Image: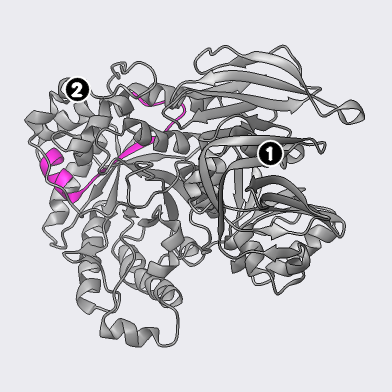
Amino acid sequence: MPLRPASVTRPHPAMRRIASVLLAGGLSLVWGPLRAEPAPAGARWQHLTTALFFTSEDVENLLAKPADRQAALEYFAPLRLSKVYLDSASGDPAAVAVLRGIAADLRARGLQVSGAVVPAGEKGPLCYNSAEDMALLEGRVRVLAQAVDEIIVDDWLFTTCTCEKCVAGRGSESWADYRSRLVHEQSKRHLIDVAKQVNPRATVIIKYPNWYEGHRQNGYDVALQTPQFDGVSVGIETRQRATDEQHIPIYSGYVFQRWIGGDAGPKWRSAWLDNYGMQGDANDYLAEVWQAVLARAPEIIFWCAGQLHPPVPASDVYPALCARMGDFDRLAGMLEGPARGIPIHLPLGSTGEYNIFGYLGMIGLPMAPTAAFPADAKAAIFTQHSLRDPQLAAKLLARIRAGKEVFMSWPLLQDLRASELGRVMNVIADRGTATSSSFRVRGAFWDTEPVAAGRPFTFPKIQLSTWPYVRSVALIREDADFGVLLSTPYMEGTVDVLNLPDNSYDLLRLPEPVLNAVRRVFFEELGVRLVGMGGVALYPFGERQYVLYNMNDTVAKVALHLPADAPLGGWRERMNGDTLVVTRTEEGREQWKQVGTEVALSLKPFEVALVER
């Protein structure tokens, strides 16, 4: 969710008619040509459903007059919209007629129309112990429910209030437990119930923010709220990789959809993304859309109309969006089979290493998030998020006893020290940090390779005794080596531990041999692994399609490593016609030699490729 004001001043409609001319430059980083085919009147995408959010000021400035509506629809024609969401910040009954009139005209033009409410006041988030704030929320909902049959709730349905009533109401509870319960109860009473009393046909959709790690602390609880709402929209809004204050990895947008949307089942309605504050960052904005397409979101909501118009600076991403819409639709239509990935255990309402699932995805480990414990998968990933399951230690041991692999983060293993898992490794020293630019990487057959990085990396110190541990990757210093990727047999299974650099983003910068060693752990589970630099994500679909997305500002030379029985012929890249080089590879020596197949290609900055056999 953006930390943004509820409304932003919009330009006069006359400015919008020349927007494509005004925005023609300044987008050289976007891969490929920037041109959009004119959209026939009333055209829709064949494989995508698109929608546009209008804030209350957008409604006033862009839709209030027939001429403005016509201009707005012409401007947004390249998006081929199926639906619009109209926000109303008014609780005045007189606003109903105005909203009804605008909605009727838009429907006559072939658009579906839904309403939207932003549960915020002049001071920002509401207090759910304030009668005045609850009356404000009810008033807005009553207006909307008389004009439309569907209402989406913008992601201001949270609270940070610490007034005397809230402190007293919290008592001995944590803020997370108290606020989650409070917002759950009050949103039903003052939002959902009010809408259905006014309009029995009304359905209410909750939109979850992108700041998942802070959900429950501020009153969002996916496990509590999804059952009480009629639908679910999931935010992507990853914005700029380097400068946005939330620093959410691009791939997290995909995980949010698969995780929260997947748990919502048929209630999952849409992915929500926006360009707030993204002036000059068209690549990062388009990355949001690619994540929604790859997650197969039922609908893509663009927030918001005003932010995609000049003179708002962030509207400079709009031409790039228009130029890529055809490619988004084309890829959506080419995807076949179910999305595949490594099960990663993410219970609803959990917190852990900040967006670690996004960083793992951006080093080429495809994620298949699951709120339920992955008991049956041969290999699965566990992080501190798993600690929300009170039976975690016992379940992990059951996996190990069943001969399965447990891949966990070092912080999680530290938290499980009091359990049997704390005895898996004999840790000699783990205080402080270790810094070096030298690594040692062990291959699949005990061969080792020294790797020199271009700069030093800092890791929490993990120093172990010699046996029976395999340091698949170690950070090397003149006095000792320190674990980065560790593996050990235990009972009937295997335990792998990944140490995380002090700066999580450094995962993407690790040398290629280090990343290749991490990816190798899951080769048997997936039947494919990425070879190459970080910042490239892999999305397998079915048994023969592999989408690759280079999220770097530089060319990425990568390869797909597959088993030896994968054919050398019959491969193609369908999005861009990229050249593929298919070869047989050999790893190991003598009786340990292993043959594989590699499909190599070069990806331009921010290029998406679909490799298919």
On the image, which quarter does residue 473 sit in? top right
Is residue 208 in view?
yes
* Disc number placed over residue 20 in the picture, else none: 2
Start-end of magenta stretch: 43-63
Seen at 72% across and 68% down, the residue is 393
Seen at 21% across and 55% down, the residue is 6
Q: Which of 82 and 5 is in front in this view?
A: 5
Q: What element carries label 1?
A: helix
Q: Give the residue type that dot 2 points to.
A: Ser
The answer to whether 198 appears left or right of 553 in the picture is left
The answer to whether 277 appears left or right of 543 in the picture is left
Residue 299 is inside the magenta segment: no
The answer to whether 378 appears left or right of 141 in the picture is right
Seen at 40% across and 56% down, the residue is 211
Residue with the most extreme right position: 591
Residue 206's place in the image compared with 530, above or below, is: below
Which numbered disc flags the more N-terminal residue, 2 or 1?
2
Residue neighbourhood size for the residue with mark 1, other residues' Cα within 10 Å, grouped as few (<14), some (14–19), many (≥20): some
Q: Nearer the viewer, residue 408 or 4?
A: 408
Seen at 64% across and 29% down, the residue is 531
Residue 467, given in percent of the width and then of the height, sits at 83, 56
Q: In which quarter of the image is the C terminus?
A: top right
Q: Is mark 2 on a helix, strand or loop?
A: helix
Residue 11, given in percent of the width and then of the height, sits at 10, 38
Q: Give the residue type that dot 1 points to.
A: Ala
On the image, which quarter does residue 157 sit in? bottom left
Q: Could you give the CA–CA distance between mark 2 and mark 1, rounded to whole angstroms?
A: 47 Å
Q: Do the residues labelled 2 and 1 touch (CB within 8 Å)?
A: no
* Disc number placed over residue 517 in the picture, else none: 1
Q: Name the mark nearer the viewer: 2 or 1.
A: 1
Residue neighbourhood size for the residue with mark 2, other residues' Cα within 10 Å, grouped as few (<14), some (14–19), many (≥20): some
On the image, which quarter does residue 59 sit in? top left
